[in-house]
Amino acid sequence: MRETLLPYGRQLVDEVDIQAVIAVLRSAWLTTGPKVAEFEEAFAQRVGAAHAVSFSSGTAALHGAVFAAGLKVGDEAITSPLTFAATANCVLYQGATPVFADVCRDTLNLDPQRVAERVTANTKAILAVDYAGHPADLDALREIADRSSLVMIEDACHALGAEYRGRPVGGIADMTVFSFHPVKHLTTGEGGMVTTNHDALAETLRRFRNHGISSDARQRQSAGQWHYEMVLLGFNYRLTDVACALGLSQLKKLETNLARRREIAATYTAAFGDLPGVTPPSVRMEANPAWHLYPIRLDPARLTADRAQVFRALRAENIGVNVHYIPVHRHPYYRDRFGYKGGEYPIAEDAYEQLISLPMFHGMSNQDVEDVIAAVEKVVSHFAR
């Protein structure tokens, strides 16, 4: 279908973005300067949260959130097995234990009923994932969290710009985590953010990302003093002024980027809705997804090929499909450490065997979208029973 590979995701950086970065490179501050606070304030306003605290990556932001939630050795946090490993790994960083609960068949987000069944006296947090950009069942999970006095963390690394029951993702959970990796809705190169409406959590997050120190260099310079105090054991997880300048510039394009992703998703869904052997992603009435990914599911009963064969065939057409995700408990580290054998979370595991993520990024042209549709129709028709 194509002479060159169309990736599943890619950044879109324009001349305005480049000039914003150059301006910072010519300024007095490259890190922990005025652009950090400016980006945080603009981001908090966009997602409807009182505070936004930037981090050097989405993974660092997740680590900051579980630290601020107070997780420690002996504690447990319930999360999804169908996610990138960082969601569960951040719990391990604190010496706590990630406990998985199976997902809903339609959205592949955490099933609140399964979460409720996994709550114990050791549970301290629920770590929900907005798979592919579709918000989790946040109200139901909030009810479980409140009933057992748990901290609710939303891994919204896929879901910047998504809405749940008319509310923007970012101000609903106790803490919400975003990622600014190049394949996301806006990029800072690498970077992440935690948003919250809780003053105390925000203060802990700011200290944690700055070595546990209670002030930063710019604050001390403005105050004309040198004294600082380390009040907790933190990390150097700061995001730079260079990155925040890029983030600010990209944030101005977020609505356009979201609109384009939603347009692509609608085009895909219209094309694949009646294609035998293919199930487009589900969208619940209360959700307006952000479409970080567009994961289709293949019906093995209607195809003569398995997912691996379809994957290879689409790659041969230069369509850069991917798979999201290998369930976390099936990775060797988790099998060896926790004794998982497979079969513990059948809905997530069955979905994994059927999932293929199609190219989805706001820089795609109409021809790119048409190429994806034509390739999927060609390959699936070839393997149809």
Image: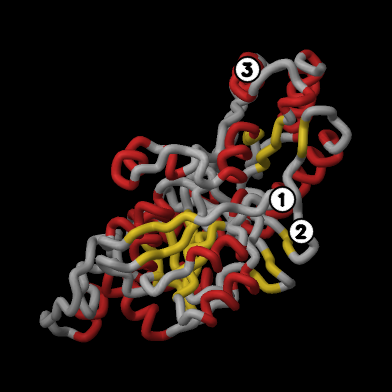
Instruction: State which quarter of the image contains the N terminus.
Output: top right
Q: Which of disc 1 and disc 3 is earlier in sequence?
A: 1
Query: Foreground residue, 183 or 111?
Result: 111
Residue shown at 78% from the left, 38% from the top: 268
Mark 2: which amino acid? Arg
Residue shown at 73% from the left, 16% from the top: 304
Give the SS element for disc 3. helix
Q: Residues within 10 Å of mark 3 (few under 14, many from 20)?
A: few
Q: Quadrant of residue 125?
A: bottom left
Give the SS element for disc 2. loop
Mark 3: which amino acid? Gln
Residue 57 vs 377, above or below: the answer is: below
Residue to which mark 2 is pinned? 284
Query: Foreground residue, 92 or 156?
Result: 92
Where in the figure is residue 190, as x and y percent of width and height?
40, 50
Instruction: State which quarter of the image contains the C terminus.
Output: top right
Tell me the distance, in whole angstroms, between the alpha carbons under discs 3 and 2: 31 Å
Q: Nearer the viewer, mark 1 or mark 2?
A: 1
Mark 1: which amino acid? Asp
Residue shown at 49% from the left, 76% from the top: 174
Q: Quadrant of residue 69?
A: bottom left
Residue to which mark 3 is pinned? 309
Residue 221 can be seen, yes or no? no
Q: Which of disc 2 and disc 3 is earlier in sequence?
A: 2
Verify CB contact (< 8 Å) between mark 3 and mark 2: no
Residue 106: give its label.
1
Give the SS element for disc 1. loop
Verify CB contact (< 8 Å) between mark 1 and mark 2: yes
Compared across the picture, whether 49 is left or right of 225 comes to right
Q: Which of disc 2 and disc 1 is earlier in sequence?
A: 1
